[in-house]
Amino acid sequence: MAPPLARRTDSLVQSEIRAISKQVNDVGGINLGQGICDMPTPEPIRLAARQAIEANKSIYSNYAGIAALRESIARKSQSYNRIPLDSVEQIVVSAGSTGAFTAAALTLLNPGDEVVLFEPYYGYHRLILQTLGFGLRFAPLVRPGWAIQWKVLEDAITPATRAIVVTTPSNPSGKVWSRADLERLLSIADEHDLFVITDEIYEYMLYDGREHVSLASLPGAMDRTITISGFSKTFNMTGWRLGYAIAPAPIADKIGLMNDLLYICAPTPLQHGVAGAFDLPESYFSEMIEQYSAKRKLICQSLERSGFEFDWPEGAYYVLAGFEPLSRRRSGFDDDAQACQTLIADAGIGTVRGASFFNDPDDGRFLLRFCFAKELPILEEACQNLERAFAPTRVGT
Ligand SMILES: Cc1ncc(COP(=O)(O)O)c(C=O)c1O
């Protein structure tokens, strides 16, 4: 028998999201579980990548990213995010925003350091930090509105705390942090001398005219902020694995070296592919918002008619919906695991259990996450199936 594996692998299990995807495929259903957008990658980006491959731009590139891409990210971050960048030395291109997050965590944190996550959290943030051996504290957001409880946040900060993670717009809650929220967070980070890592991968997916505010754009925030974003969601290319971190140059320099150690560089020809991504016409971004807004309305109305209770997402493309009202009038909704199975069996729809987003699984007991980044006809079919299965039948119709 081989010797035991490292203890850090104990918490690594096949993601339940994948298991659900398989179950949904087996029944020929529709998967609204995994957060993959299956829309096509824009043609100009695909063309530029093809050209780079044909031109044999296939060798290792600068560990922090090719110059053209870093320059393009710098321009976009100045104009869209209003981050006071003054050099490409503040940008590190990595293997997805996940690569950037991992490289940043390893750069900022020592063994024994703690990080505060807001609940509901994005599972990878938790698992990456936990697997790397850092301590975690949780600050629950409360419904309605997924409001921040400032006192709870302050209580979660200990002498070992080194960083807070903020995801805006948030997966899974859809919360978009306001400028006032971020100002207050910054004052807490200042007071306790903490880093803030912001995950802004859904920065272009905003509803009802909401504005995306980057923490690093606030006066004095850049020094302690690591802004993480990427191309996966905005340009429908989750498999290309391209993302980036923005930080003050001395920190970005070390994140770059860490990135070198972990990945050597992000995929070179694909970096050439996305170097022009932010130069797509303004209509690309506005049409994306229009399409997601229509899909959000479709699924939210359908979920409401089916008996779910939730705040409509302010951004990103998920609905974290409560099914307590349904559980009072139907069997199969005693908890999130059972509800997830009931949705597959009765409506052929895959979802993610609420427990995936909380430290205490009980906090997600009456929640399911629905992803609406689907082609419209597929989403329409999913909504019809949902209502057919769960909407109360009206007497006389
Ligand atoms: C909040 C959040 N951050 C990061 C990612 C992954 O991004 P990337 O593909 O750039 O690694 C996801 C994907 O679902 C996400 O929801």
Image (cartoon, rainbow, N blue to C red):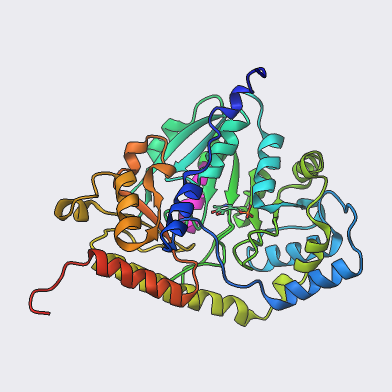
Residue 33 found in image quarter: bottom left
Name the spot of residue 268 as percent of width and height, x first.
83, 58
Relative horizontal placement of residue 333, taking residue 168 as reference (left or right): left
Q: Specify the farthest residue to the left.
A: 396
Q: In which quadrant will I find the C terminus?
A: bottom left
Residue 287 found in image quarter: bottom right
**Of the pair 80 and 296, the residue shown nearer to us:** 296
Q: Is residue 292 visible?
A: yes
Q: In which quadrant will I find the N terminus?
A: top right
Q: Point out the stretch of residues depicted in magenta.
A: 178-187
Q: Main secondary structure of the magenta part?
A: helix
Placement of 388 over or under 10, stated as above or below: below
Q: Is residue 174 visible?
A: no
**Of the pair 352 and 247, the residue shown nearer to us:** 352
Q: Is residue 273 magenta?
A: no
Name the spot of residue 217 as percent of width and height, x first.
62, 57
Q: Which residue is drawn at 47% across and 59% down?
A: 25
Placement of 195 over or under 377, stated as above or below: above
Q: Residue at x 59, y 29 (%)?
A: 9
